[in-house]
Image: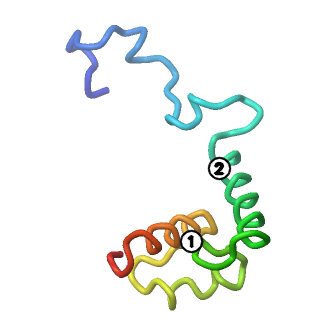
């Protein structure tokens, strides 16, 4: 509506169906979000088996429940967020 009648954007573009960036770049069968979640779960399992020390640790339900104690400022609320936060903390300790 903001651009209606201003002739800045052609009507066929202005009124076409819009999609979230991630939805527009993935298949119809599996969303980017689902693919990312599956990748995180796979990485978590792999890290648990092969590289437990000095890397991002696996994220399980128990860890996620305790996230606010480990990360009191803006604690992660998803396993994905917890995973990313661990990576951030590994490279930038104490800066979150």
Disc count in the image?
Answer: 2
**Mark 1 lies on residue:** 82
**Mark 2 lies on residue:** 36
Quadrant where the C terminus sits is bottom left
Foreground pick, 81 / 54? 54
The image shows residue 33 at horizontal and vertical percentages of 63, 47
Q: State left or right for residue 92 relative to residue 20.
A: left
What residue is shown at x 37% (from left), y 9% (from top)?
Answer: 11
Q: Secondary structure at mark 1?
A: helix
Q: State left or right for residue 31 relative to residue 81.
A: right
The image shows residue 72 at horizontal and vertical percentages of 43, 86
Q: State left or right for residue 26 relative to residue 88.
A: right
* Residue 65 position by quadrant: bottom right
Foreground pick, 91 / 24? 91
What residue is shown at x 60% (from left), y 88% (from top)?
Answer: 66
Residue 44's place in the image compared with 89, above or below, is: above
Q: Residues within 10 Å of mark 2 (few under 14, many from 20)?
A: few
What residue is shown at x 76% (from left), y 63% (from top)?
Answer: 46
Quadrant where the N terminus sits is top left
The image shows residue 29 at horizontal and vertical percentages of 77, 33
Residue lying farthest to the bottom in this orientation: 69
What residue is shown at x 72% (from left), y 77% (from top)?
Answer: 60
The image shows residue 62 at horizontal and vertical percentages of 70, 85
* Residue 95 position by quadrant: bottom left
Q: Residues within 10 Å of mark 1 (few under 14, many from 20)?
A: many
* Residue 10 position by quadrant: top left
Colour mode of the rendering: rainbow
Foreground pick, 96 / 32? 96
Query: Which comes before the other along the chain, label 1 or label 2?
Result: 2
Tell me the CA gap for discs 1 and 2: 14 Å
């Amino acid at each position: 509506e903001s651009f209606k009648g201003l002739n800045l954007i052609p009507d066929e573009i202005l009124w076409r169906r819009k999609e979230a960036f991630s939805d527009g770049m993935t298949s119809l069968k599996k969303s980017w979000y689902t693919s990312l979640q599956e990748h995180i779960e796979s990485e978590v399992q792999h890290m648990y088996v092969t590289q437990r020390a000095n890397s991002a640790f696996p994220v399980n339900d128990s860890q996620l429940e305790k996230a606010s104690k480990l990360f009191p400022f803006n604690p992660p609320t998803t396993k994905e967020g917890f995973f990313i936060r661990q990576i951030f903390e590994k490279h930038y300790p104490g800066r979150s």
